[in-house]
Image: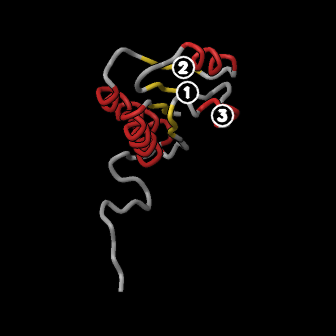
Amino acid sequence: MFLGHRSSVGLAQEAALKVRESAGFWTEAYPVWEYQHGPISCAGEGSLVWFLDEAPEVVVADVRATGAAVYANDLQAQSNLPLVHRLAVELAAIKGRNPDTPPFLNRSVLVTD
């Protein structure tokens, strides 16, 4: 799970997409303050909630109460994307996938008549 705040919500969506495409792991992205209004119910042991921006203590505490792991750092939100890419590569290796050639993925939009 990737959480963003204000302008970093789009970056959280990009981070989730990269892990989903490259590694085949199901990921989601939400604004940090909306996460507690439903999506948090899917968190638990074996889950990772990555804050790309602000990590309010009340949200961090609620995530930890689910048993999920929390990751937050002091980097700017966009500076987290290389770390996300590294995570995607490592997860892909665990699943035996080549992150450079995800199955069934087209690298361009196809238009048909």
What secondary structure is marked by label 3? helix
Q: Nearer the viewer, mark 3 or mark 1?
A: 3
Q: Is residue 64 left or right of residue 94?
A: right
Residue 98, position as x, y percentages in the image: 38, 46
Q: Which residue is mark 3?
A: 37
Residue 36 at x, y percent in the picture: 63, 29
Name the disc covering residue 70, or none. Answer: 2
Amino acid at pointer 3: His
Q: How far from the left and from the top, in percent, is residue 69?
A: 58, 20
How was this image coloured?
secondary structure
| Distance from Cα at disc 3 to Cα at disc 2 | 18 Å
- Please, is residue 26 above or below residue 57 in the view? below
Compute the Cα span from label 3 to label 1: 18 Å
Secondary structure of the residue carrying tag 1 is strand
Q: Quadrant of residue 83?
A: top left
Vertical order, 68 against 107 (above or below): above
Work out whether 75 lies above or below 98: above
As helix, strand or loop, the secondary structure at mark 2 comes to strand
Q: Which mark is residue 48?
A: 1
Pointers 1 and 2 in contact (C-beta within 8 Å)? yes
Q: Is residue 79 left or right of residue 24?
A: left
Q: Distance from label 1 to label 2 (Cα)?
A: 6 Å
Mark positioned earlier in the residue sequence (3 or 2): 3
